[in-house]
Image: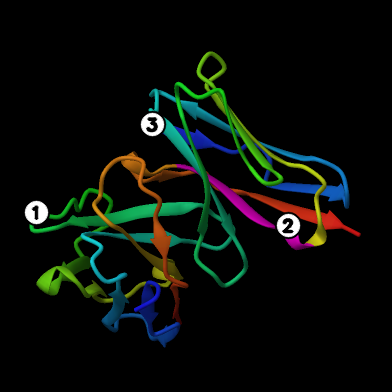
């Protein structure tokens, strides 16, 4: 596609439920990032995929968070047993090769609200 | 820990004036810094990258400087317009580190 696509754009869930957020990166981009942005805050790094390498999961806040990237393209971020503090905008970004200094192309994000 | 700090949460200026936003980094020496613009409800959009051996970079009305002695980058918007109103983020994407952003409001 023309840009990074994220779905759904909004998700409202109840505390304790599991949610899946989807990211479709720009075609041909080998690097994919997930970030979390709480209201009025900067971006918090969650996880990074580069090609077929093992993902960098160092930013995942707890074992309730996981992500996978199938076929080197689409990625899914899963949050199990959601908590109210998980409410935030989840942003996905991709870059062509993952080299240092490459600009990130972001999607519009998924606004997650946990009631 | 490695940090990027943007000192001002908000900056209000009059149309036509120059906006200057500050980004400071601590506990490391990034080889480059990037600046992004974020509008409400949207993801950040890349504006400029400046490397540590570049003192200044320009793009249209935008100018970025990098001072490794002060550990600081300055982002300038000259002849500002209401359409420049947005949140501007400083980042070192190699470490996936972003500042909290400065929200600029340009008043007509």
Q: Is residue B82 left or right of residue B5?
A: right
Secondary structure character of the magenta stretch overall = strand
Residue at horizontal 19%, vertical 66%? Answer: A66
Q: Are marks 1 and 2 in contact (CB under 8 Å)?
A: no
Residue sitting at x 56%, y 23%: B55
Left or right of residue B86, residue A86 in this image: left
User: Residue drawn 78% across and 55% down?
Assistant: B105
Chain letter belonging to callout 3: B
Question: On residue A54, which mark appears?
Answer: 1
**Relative to A79, is A92 on the left or the right?**
right
Residue B44 horizontal/vertical position (percent): 51, 60
The count of marks equals: 3
Judging from the image, what secondary structure is the residue with disc 1 in? loop
Residue extent of the magenta highlight: B83-91
Q: CA distance from mark 2 to mark 3?
A: 29 Å
* Label 2 residue SS: helix
The one of B86 and B9 positioned closer to us in this rendering: B86
Could you say which is closer to the camera, residue A4 or residue A76? A4
Identify the element where label 3 is drawn: loop
Which residue is identified by label 3?
Answer: B2
The chain letter for the residue carrying disc 2 is B
Where the C terminus of chain B falls, by quadrant? bottom right
Seen as rendered, the residue at the extreme top is B69
Image height of A46 relative to A115, above or below: above
Q: Residues within 10 Å of mark 3 (few under 14, many from 20)?
A: few
Mark carried by residue B84: 2
Question: Of residues B32 and B2, which is closer to you in this image?
Answer: B32
Q: CA distance from mark 1 to mark 2?
A: 40 Å
Residue B90 is one of the magenta-drawn residues: yes
Depth check, mark 1 against mark 3: the one in front is 1
Q: Quadrant of the N terminus of chain B?
A: top left
């Amino acid at each position: 596609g023309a840009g990074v696509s994220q779905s759904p754009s909004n998700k409202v869930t109840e505390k304790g439920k599991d949610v899946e957020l989807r990211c479709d990166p720009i075609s041909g981009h080998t690097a994919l990032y997930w970030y979390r942005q709480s209201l009025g805050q900067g971006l918090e790094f969650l996880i990074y995929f580069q090609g077929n390498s093992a993902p960098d999961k160092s930013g995942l806040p707890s074992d309730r968070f996981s992500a996978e990237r199938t076929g080197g393209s689409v990625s899914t971020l899963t949050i199990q047993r959601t908590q109210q503090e998980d409410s935030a905008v989840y942003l996905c970004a991709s870059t062509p090769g993952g080299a240092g200094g490459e600009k990130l192309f972001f999607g519009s994000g998924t606004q997650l609200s946990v009631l | 820990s490695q940090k990027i700090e943007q000192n001002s949460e908000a900056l209000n200026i009059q149309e036509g004036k120059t906006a200057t936003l500050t980004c400071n980094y601590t506990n490391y020496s990034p080889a480059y810094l990037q600046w992004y613009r974020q509008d409400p409800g949207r993801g950040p959009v890349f504006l400029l990258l400046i490397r540590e051996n570049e003192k200044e970079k320009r793009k249209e009305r935008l100018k970025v400087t990098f001072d490794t002695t002060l550990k600081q980058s300055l982002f300038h918007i000259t002849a500002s317009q209401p359409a420049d109103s947005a949140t501007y983020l400083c980042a070192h994407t190699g470490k996936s580190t972003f500042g909290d952003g400065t929200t600029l409001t340009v008043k007509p």
